[in-house]
Image (cartoon, grey):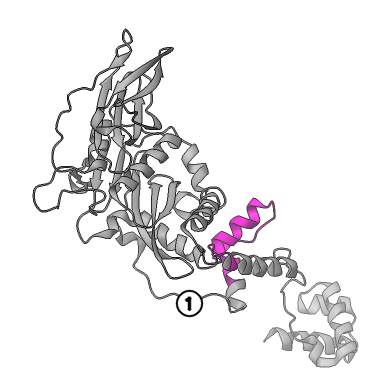
Amino acid sequence: MSRGNRNRVIAHAIVDGGLTAADAAARFGISRQWASTLANRYREGGDDALEPRSRKPRRSPTRTTEGMRQRILTLRTELAGAGLDDGAESIRDRLTRAGEKAPSVSTIWRILRAEGVVIPQPQKRPRSSIIRFEAVQPNETWQSDFTHWPLADGTDVEIISWLDDHSRYLVRISAHARVTGPIVVATFTSAADTHGLPASTLTDNGMVYTTRFARGGSGPNGFETLLGRLGITQKNGSPAHPQTQGKIERFHQTLKQWLRRQPPADTIQALNQQLEHFQELYNEHRPHRAINRSTPGEAYRSLPKAEPRLRHGDEHWRVRYDTVDNVGTITIRYAGRLRHLGIGRAHAGTPVILLMNGPQTLVTARHTGELLAEHIIDPGRDYQPRKRQKPLPKEGLHVNDVPEHL
């Protein structure tokens, strides 16, 4: 007998058959209270009132409030309008960091889907099928690449970025009319001046980064020479295999998504101001899935930094910009005294980048990346002559020759 029919038999036995609630309870094996309830329901609503009622709670304490639903939709609109990640995980991060009690990622996704604001995506390659490499420490590897972007009048410019492999921290980004070898050297040394030198770099095989595929037997370029002198391992991806530099490639997608939501920049200077703002947003206000929803800045500062093999005691490389004077020297202060570093009269007036590590120096031409001089400072004398420069191997280190990639 179904529950509905059983309820009707009990109610009719009491109301129409003259049984008391106690008698019906004893006969049908139920409580007296339940027998009385069935009789009262029958008197008030007839047989329809005796059908089994839903056991669903009248109120759900975990149900997302209408206010929170609207907050989620508002955040989605704001993030999309700013060109930032606007998925369920990003929305939950924003709510949590604002001190609000956020629903789960799946709940937020269902709310977005119900409102029709989720953009369907094609089936993607399973993550488990991709072999990933990630540096263990900050400054263990910096990835670099450059991409194109138009100014308001359609002029094409190039944006070069330096990204820490471990934390995704953006150590340097800038726009230029064209990215050249000297610009690679200048942006790298500028980043190193602020964040310290990395233990290695990872780039593609563009001529601004390496000449190992150049015809004619040319030697290392300025960037390769600088890395070799500093003890920094240079890694280059396999030709026609951009996945090796996947983090910087993905970063440029994020960058362009944001730039599309900004007013077009009229000049390179204006674009660089936008990039400076983006760098702050990306590093300090945008949690990243691959680093456990931390911001790149939090991840970059959470561990000790890796360093190049070449060190002098506990000293770190320092970076300074200068110009060779008319007698072929530049002046520095070392051990409390001014010292004159010999560069050569042929380089008078040349803007240079000076790197110092204790008594060791490297001087490169700012506009060409050419290594001009090295010194070991003698504390007992004022004038410091150049060291004889040792030639470097022609080719940089291929990424597949590095132990962690074997």
The residue positioned farthest toward the top in the image shown: 380
User: To which quarter of the image does residue 29 belong?
Assistant: bottom right
Residue 86 drawn in magenta: yes
Q: Residues within 10 Å of mark 1 (few under 14, many from 20)?
A: few
Q: Is residue 395 above or below residue 389?
A: below
Of residues 61 and 114, the one nearer the viewer is 114
Residue at left offset 51%, top offset 76%? 119
Q: Label 1 sits on what residue type? A: Pro
Q: On the rendered structure, is 47 left or right of 83?
A: right
The magenta stretch spans which residues?
A: 81-110
Please name the residue that numbered disc 1 is placed on. Answer: 120
Q: Residue furthest front?
A: 326
User: Residue, x 80% and y 85% (percent of image)?
Assistant: 10
* Residue at position x 30%, y 61% in the image: 129
* Residue 82 at x, y percent in the picture: 58, 64
Picture layout, residue 222 above or below residue 74:
above
Above-or-below relation of 114 to 128: below
Q: Nearer the viewer, residue 153 or 95?
A: 153
Front in this rendered view, residue 143 or 261: 261
Q: Secondary structure at mark 1?
A: loop
Residue 184 percent location from the top left of the image: 33, 47
Question: Does the stretch in magenta take in 27?
Answer: no
- Please give left or right for residue 362 compared with residue 155 in the image: left
Q: Is residue 312 visible?
A: no
